[in-house]
Amino acid sequence: MANLYSAQPEPQRSIPWKLVIPLLVLLLLVVLIVLNLGAIGTAISNVFTFLFDYESRVDPSQIIECRGNSACTTIQAILFSAILFFVLLTGFAYTTLLERVFLARLQHRVGPNRVGPFGLLQPLADGIKLIFKEDIAPAQSFRAVYLIAPLLKAVPVLVVVAVVPWGPDWVVPWFDGNWYRVPLSLADPNVGVLWVLAITSLGTYGVALAGWASNNKYAILGGMRATAQMISYELSLGLTMAVPILLASSMSLGDIINRQVYIWEWYIFQNPVAAAILFIALLAEVNRAPFDLPEAEQELTAGYMTEYSAMKFAVFMMAEYLGMIAISMIFASLYLGGFQDGFGLVNGLPILGPLVLIGKVVLMLMIMIWIRATLPRIRYDRLMNFGWKVLVPLALVALSWSAIAVLVADFSASPMVYGIVAGLIFVALVVGGYLVLRRSGEIAVEEDEQTDDPIITGERRGLGPVAIQVVGGLIAVPFVLYDWTLKQLDRLAALNQPETADTETTAVEPARPRQARDAGK
Amino acid sequence: MNVIRGFATTFKHVLEEPVTVQYPEEVKQFNVRYKGRHHLRRYDNGLEKCIGCALCAAACPADAIWVEAAENTDDERYSPGERYAKTYEINMLRCIFCGYCEDACPTQAIQLAHEFQLSFTDREDAIFTREMLLDPPPDGVPGTPQKVERGVFNRSIPDQEDPY
């Protein structure tokens, strides 16, 4: 038996094909390039002119506006959705690789780097493995719903990307010889943000139905918990999505992005509290760390995905990673300026738009992976506590901050006032937050008896109830003002009338008789 | 806040070189006492140290060693002593690399060295025989069996200074 320890025969020298074939191919390529240098140079300069300088080739008056042309809108919609679909799926595959590699680097180790150069074919290997896995379904599961539930979670996150604009309008040639100015979004409705909010809410159906249809009581419980988590964080989601609407005075994502051309105009600087709350709420929406109790490996035996095997489980994973990409795009569009880089370059060079948006999405993905590597998972009751008692009041405060600042600026008709008011509120929040945090436990306090602990006494203390009362008072202010204004107007109107005993008949001009009216015409 | 310090800690790991050893391009260096594959040692004159006493087989907790002894003669001498191990087989699938055989051996014949790349594709290939485990003789020295002078080697364990 031949093995490591038997005498090895002398290795025969043969042609090392592994080296020779690539070298021959390289040589062939070099020869071809050298022979065609002129043509290659012309081709490169043509590409550059095409990308950056279309005005030299096309008369601006000849450009057809795609939004008005029904044939163009149909073809643009079909082509754009096909391209977007493939881009998103490839993005999802490589997001898994990015997560594994970046998570590994954050944990002082190296991610997968064996399967292709730098591990780039790893998602392909994972996909092939999942296809070949055995597809088990529980016998007593409600088969129709069981099969559809993963899709119910995955399709809304694919669809929500439809309203995100990828760049300013592009001028592209088409096969019929004309040049068209096409918008780079699948749809830009006037209520884009509302649409986003509505579609993200549909994802909860998939989770709840997946848990129920598995015929497993732990799966049902896990599904209920996950659904409750997603629903309770939608409140702060809606509130903080309202802040860019306020600041941009439009719900359309294209308008919101076009208001954030320069980096000092980005809404993340105008209301950082709302941006932070939106980010946290979006993390909880897609069940992402540290809110990933429904899908954590230790808890998976009690989670809604328990009874799902190869391909259906892959669809759930796809839904999660696509959700990460979708929320990154939404957050970038609402608070980080979307496809606008901070210096106004994209409006002059429209081809950069998608690249800038992809760059921001990758940055947000890396931040999410960083958070996953750092923070421990939050326990379910603390998660719900956080969502309802901390995030919702803070979101209300953040919303009222922007609302008050915008109202005061509108009254005084000066943008400086807006900045000053927003800045004052920000300082107040920071100082107040610091004082509250300092009092609530960063410094160790000797507790010799536990009877004072609100968990035991049930007495409500802390930031939440106080904030609710303050915010309630603030919210009451416009109503009180409205009421008072109406009373003043009524009083003013009453001053105009002469004082008679019978105000009814004199207050109203008597109707002219019919004949008089017809004769007067 | 402490959360920020946590993020900084995690991020510092990105900037440092990862601790992963890229096997098989890089192989981690082992400690001196790493227990790898067994070797049957020889003396400097070429004779084998193993005298076929089977104490290692008795000590092995996994019953992985099989020893059959045979008589030495001065014309055909394998080891300095009355016996040598004619058949010596270790089943690497049973061996747990605990090193008890090394501790039990009276002549320090069997020692666990640093080889760890011991893969095989058939169960029969897992049984390492005496020829596979025996060290080659030192340079310039004839191997076993040797023809030696009569009566020189009459002790199983020769007189030597304490190696420890």
Image (cartoon, coloured by chain):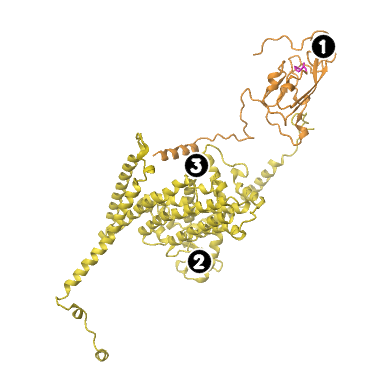
Chain colours: A yellow, B orange
Image coords of residue A513 (percent x, y) = 24, 89
Q: Position of residue A36 (x, y in %)?
A: 61, 52
Q: Position of residue B46 (x, y in %)?
A: 76, 16
The stretch of residues the image draws in magenta is B47-51
Circles 1 and 2 on the same subunit: no
Camera-side mark, 1 or 3: 3
Queried whether the magenta region covers residue A24, the answer comes back as no
To which quarter of the image does residue A507 belong? bottom left
Secondary element at tag 2: strand
Q: Secondary structure at mark 1?
A: loop
Callout 1–callout 3 Cβ contact below 8 Å: no
Residue of label 1: B148
Q: Which residue is mark 3?
A: A373
Q: Nearer the viewer, residue A362 or A104?
A: A104
Considering only vertical position in the picture, is B90 above or below A285?
Answer: above
Of A282 and A298, which appears nearest the observer? A298
Few, some or many C-alpha atoms within 10 Å of disc 1 (few <14, some 14-19, many ≥20)? Answer: few
Residue position marked by numbered label 2 in the rendering? A179
Identify the mark nearer the N-term, 3 or 2. Answer: 2
Q: Chain of mark 3?
A: A
Q: Are marks 1 and 2 in contact (CB under 8 Å)?
A: no
Task: Report the predominant secondary structure element of the magenta stretch.
Answer: loop
